[in-house]
Image (cartoon, rainbow, N blue to C red):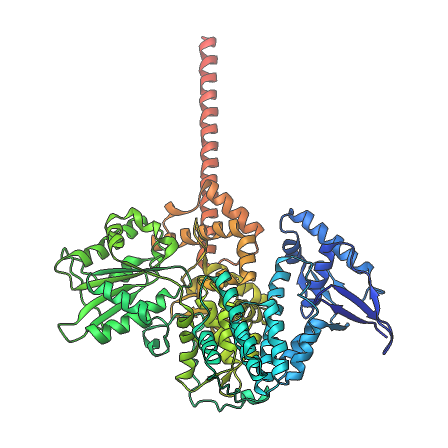
Amino acid sequence: MNPRYRFEFLGIFQLSVQQKPEGEWRELDRPATVKAQSLLAYLVMNRKRPSQRETLATMFWENSPDRKARQSLATALWHIRQIFPDNSLIKSDTQTIRINSQADIWLDVDIFDDYLSSSDYEDWQMAVTLYQGDFLQTFYDDWIITQRYTYQARFYEALARLMVVYESNGAFEKARTSAEQLLSHEPLREDAHRLLMRAYNKLGQPERALRQYRRCREVVLAELKVEPMAETTDLYQAILEGRFSHQPAKQTTAGDQFAVEEPVTSNPPYKGLQFFDVADAELFFGRDSVVKQLADQFLISNFLAVVGASGSGKSSVVRAGLIPFLQKNHQYSYHLITPTARPLQVLSSLLDDGNDPAVSPPPNKSSNPKTKRVLVVDQFEELFTLCRDESERHQFLQRLVTAVTSPKSPWKLIIVLRADFYAHCAEFEGLRNLLARHQGYIGPLTTDELRQAIEQPVLQHGWEIAPGLVDLILRDMGNEPGALPLLSHALLETWFRRRGGSLTLDGYSDAGGVFGAIAKTADHVFHELPPDQQRMAQNIFLRLTELGEGTLDTRRRISLNELIPPQAGQDDRGVVLKRLTDARLIVTTAETAEVAHEALIREWPTLRHWLNKNRESLRVHRQLTDASQVWERLEKDEGVLYRGANLSEAQEWFETQPVQLNALEDAFLQASIAFAEKQRAEKDAQHQRDLMAAQQLAETRTQAAKQYRNK
């Protein structure tokens, strides 16, 4: 029979083999090097698909030259093969390495996941028992650290589930034990502190309950420099005054928590990576005070810059908060644009072409002559990331500034700007002066505002949230800046995994949590694609990313035509685009495509790896893309074709990089090559003509000399 292998990654890395059914497990030595051990763990964790040798070499030996990295990979693979009783476990060829799909493997993290997927709380207890330590706790590879955080979160979630269920069943001693175990790992979990306070009180130990509050307050003050949540303080006060009456949660078993009837509406209460738009105002919560402050600033001026970090929610604040507020309370109409690569074209339907700087009314203007007009320019940083024409950029800004400073203009202006592009505006005097006087900064939400943003969209439509879930999410969020899109995506994925009418702890964990949901969704979608479509998807994501120059990488909105290379069928490309769009990773219109949010660029390790590995190559490709588009706009003028060093660099890059050019880029490169060959041919022909002329001249002079001597 084939041997059975046992891999234990939770805690100390251990390998065992069982040669006979029901036989004893024999512990195996680990591979001789740490890199080989990590490589084996990676192959086992990803055994459902082959791993590319090139990817593994770059991933594990990223600081080594390519040839050295490939040699190191081969050596590590040799070390792995030495420890197994036969050679059947590892399968490899010149391109890939994988674990034999027929191998009989027991893996503790798989069992751990299975237990947590159950609706039986006894299985959750088994998961807690199985968790003997952090995932591969003595290793520090990037991929391992990411997995470690995921399994830590799931372990903490199991403890949180158990303490809630035990409390619901009246098993206060077990609830206390689970809460204490959770706090030993996460001492800032106020939900666990509160449960301990309730449990001690129910066990007839109110003094310990009060002492638990003081311990909670000490930890929160020391670590976060804030007081405990109002919910925690209110519970303390109730116990202190003897008026605490704890009503256990209505579910009594894990299965019962899913018994809530699902509301009639099936529309998601969350937006995922997409911003809240004007039509989503009823789902937008937690920003009332910020919206009011921005409105107060805007009403006393014709201009307002709304500035914030990527992921701070500034677009949503303006679209779903400020615009509806102005429409409702102050009779404002609005027209919303983004600059794109051709900002003057965007303005062409709004601004008069004559000398009058007044702005023409937008197509959807109100019939009420008293209605004021607001132009909103969202994603203002596109002016610097997508627009390559310095003159066009200056003209666009000049027309905006004129439109809001002219006494005759009926317009007011709001721009939404990413904070790391603030300095880019300084070189434009008119804009700089406006920014200096009229701006509002979008900071992070407070804990109470976050709670509103999580709970209210769900509760107002009749859904329910499992006890402890909001506290778990708030704890996961911490004080991480720019995490709102991560939160929104995790909430949407949790909603997709709901049971009945409830958002559950299990669904949240399965989604990947706040900081794992995006990567989990993107990796899942990517790896479900066949290899040829994976290459298309990679090409799409790379094209939709604008490399930063002293700033973070940003999303890049492009024409759909740019995404279709000549050697790939349009049907395949359409399938890939639809799959990515259905997963809400990419947003498309009839003409354009872009990633749903820059958080995907920041938080998806696979995409970061592609970008970091091919950064210089991507710069060459992006320059080629821009040059080809200029060539097309100038009706394929030979004057803008690549020459000299630019052409040599592009040709060398094209020959060595497995990238798909679209039809325009390919035509531009081939035209540049043909033009260069034509010039070389003409130069060679001219050289030959010059040689022939020189020879003829020499012969003429020779003949003349001979004739002179013969006289």
Q: Please identify the quadrant where the C terminus is shown.
A: top left
Q: Say whether residue 575 is visible.
A: no
Residue at the location (70% across, 75% down)? 129
Q: Say whether residue 493 is visible.
A: yes
x%, y% of residue 361?
18, 67
Residue at the location (16% across, 72% down)? 371
Q: Please identify the quadrant where the N terminus is shown.
A: bottom right
x%, y% of residue 393?
30, 52
Q: Quadrant of residue 344?
A: bottom left
Count the labels in the image: 0
Near-viewer residue (343 or 134): 134
Near-viewer residue (515 or 446): 446
Near-viewer residue (490 or 201): 201
Residue at the location (41% across, 53% down)? 626
Q: Classify residue 119 as left or right of residue 304.
A: right
**Position above or below: 12 against 678:** below
x%, y% of residue 550?
43, 48
Q: Quadrant of residue 704?
A: top left
Q: Classify residue 208 as left or right of residue 38.
A: left
x%, y% of residue 103?
77, 72
Residue at the location (63% across, 81% down)? 173
**Position above or below: 710 against 595:** above
